[in-house]
Amino acid sequence: LDFSKRAGFVNLGEHMWRHGDQLGAAPRQREKNMDWVPQPATLVIEQQDTDTWWVLASAGHTERPTPWMRRFIFGFHEALRTFCTEPTTLVHRPLPSDGELLRLFDSNRWLSEKE
């Protein structure tokens, strides 16, 4: 993508531009009942500029409960870390148990280098 400014404008990522052009539209009001979520899980990897990337993940709690999301976050982090630091390593290594993941997340050790 071209991230240089032109005539005072710069490209906005998709996460900053939702539901199209809303200029002049009446403000949306929350309805009494919530609508169904059209996608129970989404993952967007987006380049903001030459040095900045965003990873946006969302999931419906009913379809993807907390233990599933913990495994997803850990697995995604491990996949990205090993891709960047150990590109020849084997994939699909066993995941820690949910109890081990809880301890890792509580201690923030899961963000550090591989132990």
Image (cartoon, rainbow, N blue to C red):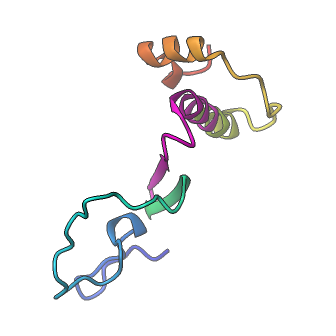
The picture quadrant where one finds residue 77 is top right
Q: Position of residue 49 (x, y in %)?
A: 41, 63
Task: State whether residue 102 is above or below residue 72.
Answer: above
Question: Which residue appears at 35% of the width and 81% of the height?
Answer: 20
The picture quadrant where one finds residue 75 is top right
Question: Which residue appears at 53% of the width and 56% of the height?
Answer: 45
Q: Position of residue 80 (x, y in %)?
A: 62, 40
Quadrant (top left, top right, bottom left, bottom right) of the C terminus: top right
11 or 17: nearer the viewer: 17
Asked if residue 52 lies in the magenta stretch, the reply is yes
Question: Which residue appears at 72% of the width and 32% of the height?
Answer: 86
79 or 3: nearer the viewer: 79
13 or 96: nearer the viewer: 96
- 114 left or right of 28 in image: right
Asked if residue 4 lies in the magenta stretch, the reply is no
Task: State whether residue 11 is above or below residue 79.
Answer: below
- 33 left or right of 71 in image: left
Task: State whether residue 71 is above or below residue 96.
Answer: below
Counting labels gives 0
- 50 left or right of 99 in image: left
The picture quadrant where one finds residue 90 is top right
Q: Position of residue 92 (x, y in %)?
A: 79, 32
In magenta, the rendered stretch is 49-76
- 115 left or right of 31 in image: right
Q: Position of residue 94 (x, y in %)?
A: 76, 22
